[in-house]
Image (cartoon, rainbow, N blue to C red):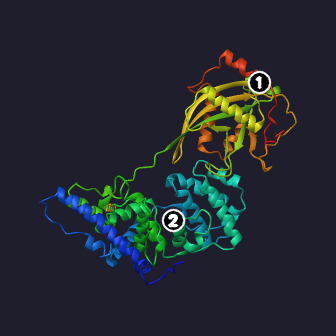
Amino acid sequence: MLHVPLLPVSSSYWVRSKFPAFCTSMAEEDSITITKKRKARGRRDEGAVAVPDIEDAVMDDRGCFSVEAAHAVRDSLLRWYDKNKRDLPWRRRRIHNDDVDDDDDDRAYAVWVSEVMLQQTRVATVVDYYHRWMERWPTLLSLSQASLEEVNEMWAGLGYYRRARYLFEGAKSIIEGGEFPSTVSDLRKVRGIGDYTAGAIASIAFNKVVPVVDGNVIRVIARLKAISANPKESATLKKFWSLAGELVDPCRPGDFNQALMELGAVLCTPTSPGCSSCPVSNQCHALSLSRDKNGDCEVTDYPTKVAKAKQRHDFAAVCVVQIVEQSDLEAWKANKKKCVFLLVKRPEQGLLAGLWEFPSVLLNGKKTDQMTRRRMMDRYLKKTFNLDCKGVYGVVSREDVGEYVHVFSHIRLQMHVELLVLSPQGSEGGEMVLLDEKGHYAIEWKCVDDESIQSMGLTSGVRKVYKMVHDFQRGLHQYSRKPTKKKTKKLNSWTGPMLPCPSKGSGNIYVI
Ligand code: SF4
């Protein structure tokens, strides 16, 4: 663990004293990058008049921020932040029911929740979620006593559900540990807390003089120092952490870190930075270069744009299984009776772990025709629910609803959605259990009605599929079409064992 002095040693001194070799290598790298750039531009600008270089003012001879530059950035940025910071709920100390303000631990919890929600999500979206979350679980203790199901429900629509699970598991582990960790190294031991979140909690809630580095900070620092190295490379990322450490204010580290991020979020934006009203424009090397080079270089050239990793294309067959009691069939057809939907729980590991969805089958990364999809889905339903689609009667209809593409950060999932309406007679043998080789329940399922679906914490993908089916049944969906007679005949020849229980309920599927 690195000891971080509180006062009055400047953070740049701290970084340099702790990482002397690193500072040197940074300086070398910087000078290589900048020299290459200058040579290239020199060739383009032969004959141009030499201009004074801002580097001398911003950097010392090792490529770090000079002491004066760091002071200037801190002063200007904090003054700007005090006047212009957005009034965001997680920046306010809360008053609890007993009229007592947040203590440091409450503050740490609030910062933690907001920082996790803000990852990959816009501030405007997060505000509502944050209010609802804090109303439901105002303290770490209350969150630790919730269930994962409730947490996922609250998170529904925010995406990247692993964040919610880690937040929940982290809360439980901190409560078991007895106290909220206050240093970066202790915070890093909590599952789901990475360097950025640890730095944010330690500096904002516990006033530790430590930096944070997120996309906004990278952009601002890359421009302040005109760094053209690839920010995705680990050596470059280390460099940004080190530079952020040089800048962080020893008296107001939390405010400074928020100010730096705020600048990146509202002024030093990716495509249209507001340099004319920027509080640190005098220390901005990229701005100076852009002025000197008369349009040959833009501040938006920094940081270097990195080509995004190619998205994987996946295909899935999704079968929305609607179950109608035999005795309700006529009423259901007349739209007077509701049915229930079958939902299954995803595995506890991997993408969307532990979340509920309609029965789905991945199609081996290939686009497939309807017959192949149905064959694969039939196999899945047989294996999972002991439903023999080739022999069981009770199929009211089976129709293709349409396609829906859901984009995750690295996967483009194209879903072929079909609607299978079943009206099984009785429930032979009651519940069945599907066990894996070790004798554990292999899958969890439940049947839910429309109202429950709407209030459940379902992913936006599942909600979209539900809406497609809903529209399809009301005749609104563009892919709507009636099944041919031939198909209906074939489908109605389905005979065999029934789904365990067509009424609303939940449980595990039993293998017989
Ligand atoms: S001067 Fe412009 S490019 Fe430089 S930090 Fe400010 S907003 Fe960003």
Please tell me in which quadrant of the rendered image residue 72 appears.
bottom left
- Residue 24 appears in the figure: yes
The residue pinned by badge 1 equals 494
Against 33, is 253 above or below?
A: below
- In this rendering, is residue 14 above or below 218? below
Q: Quadrant of ligand 1?
A: bottom left
Q: Amino acid at mark 1?
A: Trp
Q: Say what secondary structure mark 1 lies in.
A: loop
**Which residue in the rendered view is the most extreme toward the top?**
485
Occupied quadrant, residue 257: bottom left
Q: Position of residue 364 (x, y in %)?
A: 59, 38
Residue 107 can be seen in this image? no
Residue toward you, 326 or 441: 441
Q: Which residue is mark 2?
A: 196
Where is residue 16, by image quadrant?
A: bottom left
Mark 2 vs mark 1, foreground winner is 1
